[in-house]
Each structure stands twice: as C-alpha cells, then as structure tokens.
Amino acid sequence: MDHRAIILGIDSGTSVVKAVAFDLEGQQLGCASVRNTYYRHIDGSALQCMDKTWQDCALAIRKLGEQIEDLPRRVAAVSVTAQGDGSWFVDTHNRPRGQAWLWLDARAAGTVKNLEQHELALARFQATGTGLNTCQQGAQLAFIESQYPELLDSSDAVMHCKDWLYLNLTGVRATDPSEASFTFGNFRTRRYDETVIEALGLTHRRTLFPEIIEGTEVTHPLTEEAARVTGLLAGTPVCLGYVDMVMTALGAGVFTGDANTACSVIGSTGVHMRAVSNDDVYLNEARTGYVIALPSPGMVTQVQTNMASTLNLDWLLNIVQSLICQFGGQVDHATLLQHIDRWLSESRPGSLMYHPYISLAGERGPFVNPDARASFIGLGYSHGFADMVRAIIEGMGMAARDCYRAMGSAAPEELRLSGGAIRSPQLRQILGACIGAPVRNSTREEAGAAGAAMMAAVAIGVYPSISQCVDTWVTPLLGEREYPDAMLIERYNALDVSYQQSRDLLPPVWRDLQHLLPQQLTPPVSDGTNIAAERSLK
C-alpha cells in the first residue's frame, strides 16, 4: 500500500463534527471540525437536525481536503463513529422523519421507571449488561410508542448517529455490535435478543432495527453522491465504527493488555471504563452501567458514565462570562479555562462538597435517577469562587470514584485519561487522588476518531487484529505515570464518606423539587418541530 496512504476517521459529537487524517502507523496528519447545533425545550426534549449533521460531516471532510495535499487519492479507507444513544428516524426513502432525539433528551424518564417494573426487566439487564436510562434508544422508543406512535408508524428504520452518517456515506442501513447489543441485544452474542426487545414492549417494532455489521470485517464503498458532497473518491471503503465511548477509550488506552487498568474520558460527560472479557463482567445489584463490546472477540468494556462531567464546570464559567458581559466586559470561555490551575492553587482541598448532577436528565451512573440535581454542601461565608471551582472538580472525581466502585472490583492500579479537561495538571492530580491511582495521559489528540480509524486499518488488512494495531497506534503515546499526593488521597478518602452519605439522603429532596417546578408549557410535537433554540454547552 502507498506509504502516503491515509485513513480518515470521522467523529460526530453532539455539537462538533471532526474529520481526522491518520497515516497507517497512527500519526495524526490533520484535523478539521465543524460546529453542529442541537436544541432544547422546556419539556425536556433535546433534538438535532439530521440533514444538518450530515452536511456538517461532509463539510468537515472537505475542509480536511483543504489542509492535506491530494487527500481524495490518498484515502485508503474512511471510518465513522459518533455520539451514542438517541434515536435517528428514516422513512422508506432513507430521508429523515423529523429531527433526531439526542441522548440528552429527558422525556422518557417516566417510561424508564415503568419499564423497570416489567417482569422481564432483570432478564433484559442480564442480557445487555446495561441499566436502562433516559438516554437510550430503547427507552425513547418505548416512550414514543406510548405518546407518539405515528412517528414510529411513519418510520422505516431507527438508527444511531453514526449509522445515519454511514447510510449517507454508503447507502447501506446498518448498525454496529456495540450499540445494538447494549440497547436491544446480548453482549455475549453481539446480536439482537428477542427477550430484551419484548421487555421494552417493542416486539411489534422489530422491523425498525437495522442489520448488525462488524466494521473490522465488513466495509461498503462510498457512493457517487457521497463522493460528490465530500470530495472523496467513489468506491473508497467505508467502515462503520463502534459507539464513540468505546472508540475514544480504545484510542486512549483502555485495551493494551495491561492488568487492572482503567480509562476515564473527562468531557461534557464522564465516561469510566475497564476492558474485561465476557466472563469477567460484573452485573451490579442496582442494575446500572453499560457493557459495550470492543472490536476484539470476547472483549467488552465495563462502563459507568455520568450524565455531566465538565458540563458542571461549563455551567459555573458560563455564569461568570455572562456577568462580565452584562457589565460591559468581554471574556470567552477558553480564556476562563486558562485560569483553572490558578483557581485550584488558591483553594482548599475538600473544604466544600459538590454533587455533579447538573444535567436536566438527572444521572445515569452509577445510579439512575432522572430527578437528580447538582448541589453544593457546606458552603460558608469564607468560601470564594476558587473553592467552588475546586469543589466542582472534586465532585467530578468523586463521581468517577463512585463509578469504578460500582464495577465490583478494587480501584484500578492505573488510570488512563482522555478529554480536553485533562490538560490541567492539577485537575489530573485531583482525579488521581479521588480514584487513589496514578494517572497516565494519552498524547493522542483525537482519540475517538483514532479508535474508528483503527477499525478501518484492520478492515483493509493493514493490521491483522485490533490488538496488534493498539501496539502501534496507542501504547507508544501513553505518557509517564503521575502519582497523586498521599495526603490528598487521605483527604478524599475521608470526604468520600460524607459524599456517599449525603447523596443517599438527597433523592426525596430531588423528587420534591421536581414536583415544585412550573407546569410544562407547550407539549412537544412528534417530529420535533416545536422547539426553542438553546446554545449548546458542549
């Protein structure tokens, strides 16, 4: 193969679509991104324009072509990953049926509670290894079936975001083993499971689910139409990657063959993962978390994921930014982030406690409660802004600790970190101390796109397996171990007791507060057209 060959990885997040070029040894050659938009409504809906998402994807690819000489002829394969969960509907002509329901959509909260009482709820959890929550397509479809069945009646297939992009790239309706098995299937077989589908009350909607394909084994050619809008060459092999959580973890080092390591992706959400064999999966009594297949036979990721991680910090900094602007000043979000380490240096460890449940959809890991809300505890007159910043970051660390505890084994011996927030050395120290483990950064800039590109590299025969690709693409990019301060670990061990105790006492308060909220104003429309724009926090 041409030594100038490129593998193009696409990573479509909730509000940013990225196209990233890698050489065959995993070196990043270029990256282009396009801002996407999603919309929120007072009823809890979170929606995204499907056509705009595809257009933004195509634009990102064209922008990458402006950076890299002769990109179309050099691309040996394309691979796509994207935001997980959510529901993307198409009709018989593969056109969108309204707008996509995102993972942020909170409307299925009551449906989740009802489904957990179903006689097959335990069987569903044992098959999928995944706790039911408002983010998931299964819960959303069950809610839509009860409230807007006409949307399902008029749809010919329901997909996830990466599946929608793959459809536009190749003309093929498909999904991957990771999202299919944790939503509607069995992680052991990586196929649909009829008992799971029955437990969700969706047996009569079975025809909506697309074929499952394994991206390391099957590719489809780029269509003439997709070539026209992206600038790539028709016929280029396209690989359907796994869900972005797994692709990011793969690119950041969750699966390197080292024992008892873990990977946390500290982004808008917090995703905390271990790579284990099918036989070593731990299913907790609370029935929470995800079990998501890895693109390696018999291996999965045991996952717990917080609804909000850096979204908590964004909330606080957005308030500061708004106040400054109201009084005639100017400051952007990026500038405020540059002061994180200074604020942490001016604050006192563990002097204030924060539960990081800022999402309007509540929490999904390590417990599921759509009513959960964030709170400061112990706030006193002597506390300043820097203490609030530290409390939020400590809360993110405690939530991560909570998640690893729910996986049923001892704390990891090493924590690999990925995500924009880990640029802060002090933030890394706090996370390591909360978990009680040394941390290692991955210098990989775009881990999600890299994980998808690795699958394509296997699919076209550059590497015989994902494991061997990891040896070249991932392991050499892991940084040195950073050991957390022993006194900080001791402090957070003590804080954890109060964190747990207060968290266990708060659910009745969360519930009552939700009942006190004003009545919802305008009912949602089934195709998502009755929405109000809200600036994305991502």
Image (spheres, rainbow, N blue to C red):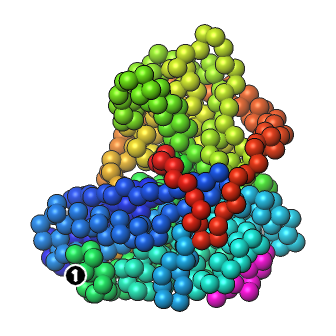
Q: Is residue 236 magenta?
A: no
Say which residue appears at 29% left-offset and 63% top-offset.
60
Tell me if residue 87 comes above or below residue 203 in the rendering.
above
Task: Residue lying at the far left in this picture: please name it.
Answer: 69
Say which residue appears at 31% left-offset and 70% top-offset.
58
* Magenta-drawn stretch, dominant element (helix, strand or loop): helix
- Mark 1 Cα within 10 Å, few/some/many (few <14, many 20+)? many
What secondary structure is marked by label 1? Answer: loop
Tell me if residue 192 comes above or below residue 530 in the rendering.
below
Say which residue appears at 51% left-offset and 41% top-offset.
310
* Amino acid marked by disc 1: Leu
Q: How many marks?
A: 1
Q: Is residue 207 magenta?
A: yes
- Observer-nearest residue: 472 or 404? 404
- Observer-nearest residue: 282 or 235? 235
Relative to residue 538, is residue 8 drawn left or right? left
Tell me if I can see residue 104 in this picture: no
**Residue 133 x/y as whole percent:** 70, 59
Quadrant in which residue 455 is drawn: bottom left
- Observer-nearest residue: 166 or 62? 62
Tell me if I can see residue 381 in this picture: yes
- Observer-nearest residue: 330 or 103? 330
Quadrant in which residue 18 is drawn: bottom left
Q: Which residue matches tag 1?
A: 233
Relative to residue 428, is residue 223 drawn left or right? left
**Residue 448 x/y as whole percent:** 41, 59
Say which residue appears at 58% left-offset and 86% top-offset.
156
- Quarter of the figure with the N terminus: bottom left
Q: Tell me the magenta residue range.
A: 198-208
